[in-house]
Image (cartoon, grey):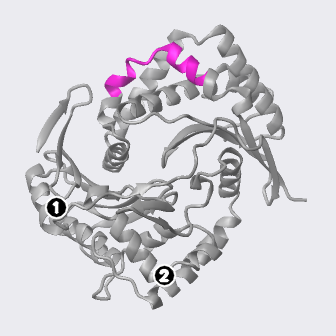
């Protein structure tokens, strides 16, 4: 394994690519009692159409999430969640639009738990009966999600922004779409996306990196399969399909999300783009910004207001939102602030404060093994190492943030999703 030391953050990272294509990253933490492992696949809710071995495959919405649920079932009749918990681990999993992650934390029997994680994720077992049972369980989950305001306003916004990309559809799918899933569908998707060449393993704790390498070689398939190529549909233009959608729901006050699409950079440029987006949004709309202070004083915003730049499944999306009695007025004020920054620029002194704040947050994040491991896994699938962020942060200039704000948040590129209280 190759090692690289990051003196600015006090970490050493061991890296390897196994003969089967698996990307392995290990962060040794001598003397620590806790261990964390993430086994992730570059497969999420948006990977609906893909090409494998020259053949195009279409799948219904919700398959990746459905597959995550079913992967814990073992041919022996046991459930991997129960076995890991009984062995002293705290296991779980999640599916997003772009990835599926299986993980656990423990303080003892780490190697046993790691072998169990690698074994159950690489051992598919589905029957028509268990699939039908899960369709009922997930169907209830989907129906409950339809009544969730946060989920509704989020997907309404994505529907305004994206015309073709399947990120606009719910990760869990619909009751109708999951009814189309069969045991064979799950086997096909597991074979395509759960090949080690499409996955990564990230471990942090008091471990020997070479030992982790050995365990991965012993527990996982030996052959290197061709990774599938995702097809997200025709290229998306910079403008939204529609600038506004309103919907009435059982909310106590109007809620809103303002959004815009980000043209996504690839490879090493992706991390720089992520950092630039975060800094730009912090200076534009953070708690210490002139925009937030002015609208808060006017009663247009409250402390629920927040923002993020979300990068997933080949897309980038800016989202700003919260509660407001006048959400469309907030949008107009945001457009004015973007115009002002385009005209006057940003204060370089505030950029330095934003960098320090961002660096401080990243240094604090190193204390959380889950944050470290998942960030490294996400970066692997996008072609960068998250440990490079601290050094790269210093190279970002005010002009970079100004260009991001001026171009990405141009008035014609903005859309707003609003939920109003049902009468």
Q: Tell me the distance, in whole angstroms, between the alpha carbons under discs 2 and 1.
A: 30 Å
At x 49% / y 56%, what residue is drawn? Answer: 96
Q: How would you rate the neighbour count of disc 1 (Cα within 10 Å): few for under 14, some for 14-19, many for 20 or more?
A: many
Residue 352 horizontal side relative to residue 286, left or right = left
Q: How would you rate the neighbour count of disc 2 (Cα within 10 Å): few for under 14, some for 14-19, many for 20 or more?
A: some
Work out whether residue 221 or residue 67 is closer to the camera in this orientation and state it. 221
Residue 191: x and y, percent? 33, 70
Q: Which mark is residue 259?
A: none
Residue 15: which quarter of the image?
top left
Work out whether residue 382 or residue 396 is closer to the camera in this orientation and state it. 382
Residue with the most extreme bottom position:
129
At x 26% / y 68%, what residue is drawn? Answer: 117
Query: What kind of element bears circle 1?
Result: helix
Residue 316: x and y, percent? 54, 40
At x 26% / y 57%, what residue is drawn? Answer: 197
- Mark 2 touching mark 1, by CB under 8 A? no
Give the mark, 2 or 1, whose residue is nearer the N terminus: 2
Residue 82: which quarter of the image?
bottom left
Residue with the most extreme right position:
423
Q: Quadrant of the C terminus?
A: bottom right
Name the main secondary structure of what is drawn in magenta: helix
Residue 41: x and y, percent? 35, 58
Work out whether residue 332 or residue 364 is closer to the camera in this orientation and state it. 332
Asked if residue 110 shows in the view, the reply is yes
- Compared with residue 408, is residue 318 higher up or lower down, i.e. above or below? below
Q: Range of the magenta residues?
A: 390-405
At x 45% / y 60%, what residue is drawn? Answer: 50
Residue 291 located within the stretch drawn in magenta = no
Residue 197 horizontal side relative to residue 188, left or right = left
**Pointer 2 residue:** 182
Asked if residue 70 shows in the view, the reply is no
**Pointer 1 residue:** 216
């Amino acid at each position: 394994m190759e090692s690289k030391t990051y003196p600015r953050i006090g970490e050493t990272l061991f890296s390897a690519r196994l003969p089967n294509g698996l990307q392995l990253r290990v962060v040794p933490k001598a003397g620590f009692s806790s261990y964390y492992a993430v086994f992730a696949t570059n497969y999420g809710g948006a990977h609906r159409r893909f090409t494998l071995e020259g053949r195009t495959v279409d799948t219904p919405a919700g398959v990746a999430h459905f597959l995550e649920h079913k992967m814990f079932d073992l041919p022996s009749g046991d459930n991997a969640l129960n076995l890991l918990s009984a062995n002293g681990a705290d296991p779980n999993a999640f599916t997003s639009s772009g990835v599926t992650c299986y993980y656990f934390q423990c303080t003892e029997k780490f190697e046993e738990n790691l072998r169990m994680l690698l074994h159950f994720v690489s051992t598919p077992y589905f029957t028509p009966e268990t699939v039908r049972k899960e369709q009922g369980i997930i169907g209830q989950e989907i129906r409950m999600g339809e009544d969730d305001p946060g989920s509704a306003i989020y997907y309404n916004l994505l529907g305004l922004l994206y015309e073709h990309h399947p990120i606009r559809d719910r990760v869990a799918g619909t009751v109708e779409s999951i009814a189309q899933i069969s045991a064979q569908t799950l086997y096909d998707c597991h074979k395509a996306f759960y090949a080690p060449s499409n996955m990564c393993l990230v471990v942090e704790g008091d471990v020997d990196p070479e030992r982790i390498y050995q365990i991965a070689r012993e527990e996982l398939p030996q052959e290197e399969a061709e990774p599938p190529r995702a097809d997200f549909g025709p290229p998306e233009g910079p403008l939204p399909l529609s600038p506004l959608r309103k919907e009435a729901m059982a909310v106590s006050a109007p809620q809103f999300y303002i959004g815009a699409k980000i043209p996504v950079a690839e490879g090493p440029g992706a991390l720089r783009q992520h950092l630039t987006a975060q800094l730009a949004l912090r200076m534009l709309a953070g708690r210490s910004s002139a925009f937030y202070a002015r609208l808060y004083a006017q009663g247009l915003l409250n402390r629920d207001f927040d923002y993020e730049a979300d990068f997933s499944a080949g897309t980038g999306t800016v989202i700003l939102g919260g509660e407001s009695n006048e959400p469309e007025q907030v949008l107009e004020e945001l457009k004015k602030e973007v115009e002002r920054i385009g005209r006057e620029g940003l204060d370089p002194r505030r950029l330095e404060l934003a960098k320090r704040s961002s660096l401080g947050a990243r240094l604090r994040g190193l204390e959380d093994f889950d944050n470290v491991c998942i960030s490294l896994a996400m970066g692997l699938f996008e072609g960068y190492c998250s440990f490079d962020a601290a050094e790269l942060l210093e190279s970002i200039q005010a002009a970079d943030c100004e260009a991001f704000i001026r171009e990405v948040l141009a008035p014609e590129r903005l859309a707003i999703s609003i939920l109003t209280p049902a009468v």
